[in-house]
Amino acid sequence: MNLVEASHISKTFMGTKVLDDVSLSISRGDRIALMGPNGAGKTTLVRAMLGFYHLDSGTMRVLKHDPIKERVEVLRHISFIPQLPPPVKLSIEELLTYVSKSAGLQKQNVIDEAGRMDLDLTKHISKPFYKLSGGMKQKLLIAIALSKKSDLLIFDEPTANLDPKGREQFYTLLQEIPETCSTLFITHRLDEIKALVNRMIYMDLGKVVEDEKV
Ligand SMILES: Nc1ncnc2c1ncn2[C@@H]1O[C@H](COP(=O)(O)OP(=O)(O)O)[C@@H](O)[C@H]1O
Ligand SMILES: [Mg+2]
């Protein structure tokens, strides 16, 4: 069974076709770099996998589930690290409690993963999430995603907020993602990601214009 099966999906925002008849499947073992110019529709495509949008036409399935009608089930299988961290008011402590309950992961596991990117969560435990720096937020979201052991991990321009050292630590962690977990990176930095992917997809003007195994 494919992890993701998008079949002829289209989505229009304010008169502009942002996804234009996109068909795409993602199988287990795929490690994808999703590339293309700003505005190509990359983020919209992954947000459609997560049930953010009602589509104009076509069908989206994640492990046969409808991302809108069965969102909870879909989110059990996919972890998504957004391009811009959400404005979460919870403290780190509360956030860790929330994710440990909702996603069934261990707080200590998240603290350990963050520590490996030089982020000491215990030092910031009562701080609200939104008061962390951009790079710290990104590291925390990455630590949560890596602790969740999902079937598919999606990163939307994950290193945009990280300094060179943070980027290096992030790529080191990625090498340990188990084979059973598929990954999709939206990125402009193919050089950084090349060694970690086996498939490259290019989008432009809402269409998939290239999809090759590498
Ligand atoms: N929620 C939204 N409402 C209106 N327009 C949107 C929305 N999300 C994205 N868009 C527009 O859709 C186009 C594609 O956006 P996006 O998928 O974010 O592109 P990419 O991630 O490839 O840079 C852009 O022109 C963007 O302005
Ligand atoms: Mg984007």
Image (cartoon, rainbow, N blue to C red):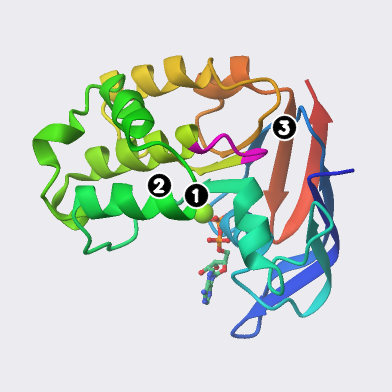
Q: Is residue 97 magenta?
A: no
Q: Nearer the viewer, mark 3 or mark 2?
A: 2
The residue identified by callout 1 is: 103
Q: Which mark is residue 200?
A: 3
Q: What residue type is labelled 1?
A: Ala
Q: Disc 3 or 1, which lies upstream in sequence?
A: 1
Q: Give the class, few, some or many, for how many residues have Cα within 10 Å of label 2's Cα (few <14, many ≥20).
A: some
Q: Kindly report the secondary structure that dominates the magenta region of the rendered protein.
A: loop
Q: Is mark 3 within 8 Å of ligand 1?
A: no
Cα gap from disc 2 to disc 1, whole angstroms? 6 Å
Whole-percent x and y of residue 171?
45, 20
Whole-percent x and y of residue 17?
70, 74
Range of residues picked out in magenta: 148-152
Q: Helix, strand or loop at disc 2?
A: helix
Q: Which amino acid does label 3 sit on?
A: Met
The residue identified by callout 2 is: 100
Whole-percent x and y of residue 45?
66, 58
Cα gap from disc 3 to disc 2, whole angstroms? 33 Å
